[in-house]
Amino acid sequence: MKDVWMVKYGEHTIRVVNTWTNEKLFVDGVLQDEQIGLHFTSRLFGKVKNKDGEFKDVKVSVGACCLRMKCRIFVDSELIYTTEIQPGG
């Protein structure tokens, strides 16, 4: 099993790769965090520059729910991606 989630943030690409044995967070192709081993939930952390050149925190939550993997990606405290359907979306 392998899940890959990608989202654009400004000119940057945030990519999360989840397999049975690890989770990885990449920003612009550079590995920023990795969890090794079998987990039912994981948190990954990284940094991304905004358009003003300031660094923003990236936080990723990955978890199993009803035999499906779910992913949420935050920049600072703003949710920018989720595998769940948003209300009104």
Image (cartoon, grey):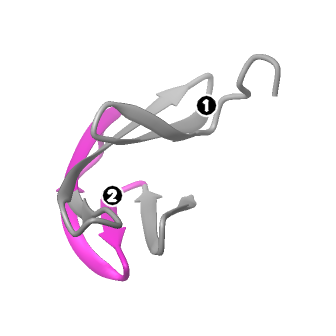
Kind of residue at disc 1: Leu
Q: Residue at x 18, y 61 (%)?
A: 54
Query: Quick check: can you spot residue 62?
Result: yes
Per the image, label 1 sits on a secondary structure element best described as loop
The disc at residue 4 is: none
Residue 24: within the magenta? yes
Residue 50 position in % (x across, y down): 31, 62
> Which image quarter holds the C terminus?
top right
Quarter of the figure with residue 76: top left
Residue 56: within the magenta? no
Does residue 2 lie above or below 56 as drawn?
Answer: below
Estimate how packed mark 1 is, as few (under 14), some (14 to 19) or many (20 or more) residues with alpha carbons within 10 Å.
Answer: few
Which is nearer the eye, 61 or 87?
87
Kind of residue at disc 2: Thr
Which residues make up the magenta segment?
Answer: 20-46
Q: Residue at x 36, y 82 (%)?
A: 29
The disc at residue 67 is: 1
For the residues labelled 2 and 1, the Cα–Cα distance comes to: 16 Å
Residue 36 position in % (x across, y down): 20, 57
Does residue 58 lie above or below 74 as drawn?
Answer: below
Counting residues from the start of the chain, the first of labels 2 and 1 encountered is 2
Label 2 belongs to which residue? 21
Does residue 61 lie above or below 8 as drawn?
Answer: above
